[in-house]
Image (tube, grey):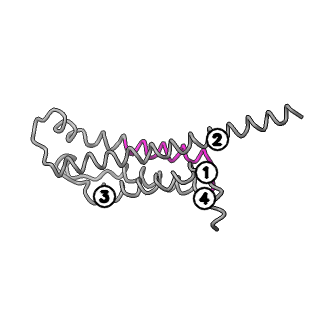
Amino acid sequence: MLNFFRNKKPYYYILFASFALALASVIIYVSNGANEYNKENISGLIVAMLIAGMVFTAAAAVFELRYIKYVAYACLFYGFLQFVITELNFWGNFIIATDPVPAEAQRYYLSLTVIMLLSWVTILVSALWQKSSEYKKEKEQDKEVAAE
């Protein structure tokens, strides 16, 4: 079992960080999501996209297919965009300062935004890093074939 993990590249371990960040996003959003800025609603679409992103991230770790990472990225990115869109009332109050925003709400929204942002950025970094690594490997193999 240890040999399995020793032979993995760093981009493989980034998947676990992305999964943990997506899980934290779901937990934080579901437990604190309903408030006066979003009309006391938790968006099922955001939760579904984050969970789908987690499922595809886990599948990418198990099956080691780079293309699954892009599907996970798309789900997490779409969930992030939906979060930003559904919370426009908060962002308007925060940026323009039309109504005072409590410090607790500021911490919640900013931390959740950063966690969601990092979840899709890490899966994208992992996919692109793996693509780069595979491209270099193919290029080396082509050089070996050409040398023969």
Camera-side residue of 73 and 114: 114
Crowd tier of the residue under label 4, counting other residues whose Cα lies within 10 Å: few below 14, some 14–19, many 20 or above: few
Q: Main secondary structure of the magenta part?
A: helix
Q: Which residue is mark 2?
A: 133
Describe the element under mark 4 as helix, strand or loop. Answer: helix
Q: For the residues carrying marks 2 and 4, which lies nearer the camera in this image?
A: 2
- In whole angstroms, how far apart are the C-alphas of marks 3 and 2? 37 Å
Q: Which residue is mark 4?
A: 62
Q: Is residue 96 left or right of residue 108?
A: left
Q: Earlier in the sequence, mark 3 or mark 2?
A: 3
- In whole angstroms, how far apart are the C-alphas of marks 3 and 1? 33 Å
How many numbered marks does the figure carry? 4
Picture coordinates of residue 105, whole percent (x, y): 18, 49
Q: Is label 2 in contact with label 4 (beta carbons under 8 Å)?
A: no
Q: Earlier in the sequence, mark 2 or mark 1?
A: 1
- Quadrant of the rendered image containing residue 143: top right
What span is in magenta?
Answer: 63-80
Q: Which residue is mark 1?
A: 9
Q: Which residue is mark 3?
A: 30
- In whole angstroms, how far apart are the C-alphas of marks 2 and 4? 19 Å
Q: For the residues carrying marks 4 and 3, which lies nearer the camera in this image?
A: 4
